[in-house]
Image (cartoon, rainbow, N blue to C red):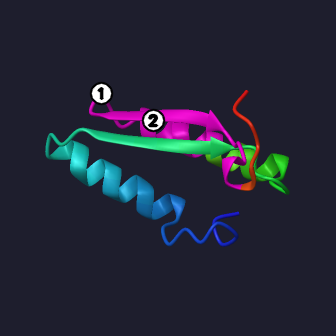
Amino acid sequence: MLELIDKRIDPSMTRTVVRRLTERGINVKSYAILGFPAETAAEIDTTVRLVHDLWELGDDHRCRVVPYCDFARGASHP
């Protein structure tokens, strides 16, 4: 899925960056999007696991999980 949406960072890199920033007292906010077309249950599980790992890093990190919505293709807001 990361390749499909052209992400240039993987979960390991995300954990490292968030840990380094929060160790230095820098607040971090991230967003995870679930439910992309063709996203498998295993990919969703991997994302959920990453979010939980990031939450474990402490109070200086906030992660919001949002459902995929295809606004770019003219889908209306629910």
Task: Say whether residue 11 is left or right of residue 19.
Answer: right
Q: Where is residue 11 in the image (x, y as percent from the top left)?
A: 52, 58
Give the extent of the magenta segment. Answer: 48-72
Q: Does the magenta stretch include residue 25?
A: no
Q: Mark 1 points at which residue?
A: 59
Circle 2 crowding by C-alpha within 10 Å: few under 14, some 14–19, many from 20:
some
- Please tell me whether mark 2 sits on a helix, a strand or a loop: strand
Is residue 3 shown above or below 77?
below
Nearest the eye: 14 or 74: 74
Task: Say whether residue 16 is left or right of residue 76.
Answer: left
Three-letter code, disc 2: Cys
Q: How many discs mark residues in the rendered view?
A: 2
Q: Residue furthest left?
A: 24
Circle 1 crowding by C-alpha within 10 Å: few under 14, some 14–19, many from 20:
few
Q: Mark 2 points at which residue?
A: 63
Tell me the CA gap for discs 1 and 2: 11 Å
Q: Which residue is drawn at 32% across and 31% down?
A: 58
Q: Where is residue 10 in the image (x, y as percent from the top left)?
A: 52, 65
Task: Say whether residue 30 is left or right of residue 49.
Answer: left
Front position among marks 1 and 2: 2
Q: Position of residue 1 (x, y in %)?
A: 71, 63
Three-letter code, disc 1: Asp
Quadrant placement of the C terminus = top right
Nearest the eye: 52 or 64: 64
Nearest the eye: 78 or 17: 78
Q: Residue at x 31, y 49 (%)?
A: 19
- Image-quadrant location for residue 45: top right
Q: Is residue 51 magenta?
A: yes
Q: Residue at x 43, y 57 (%)?
A: 14
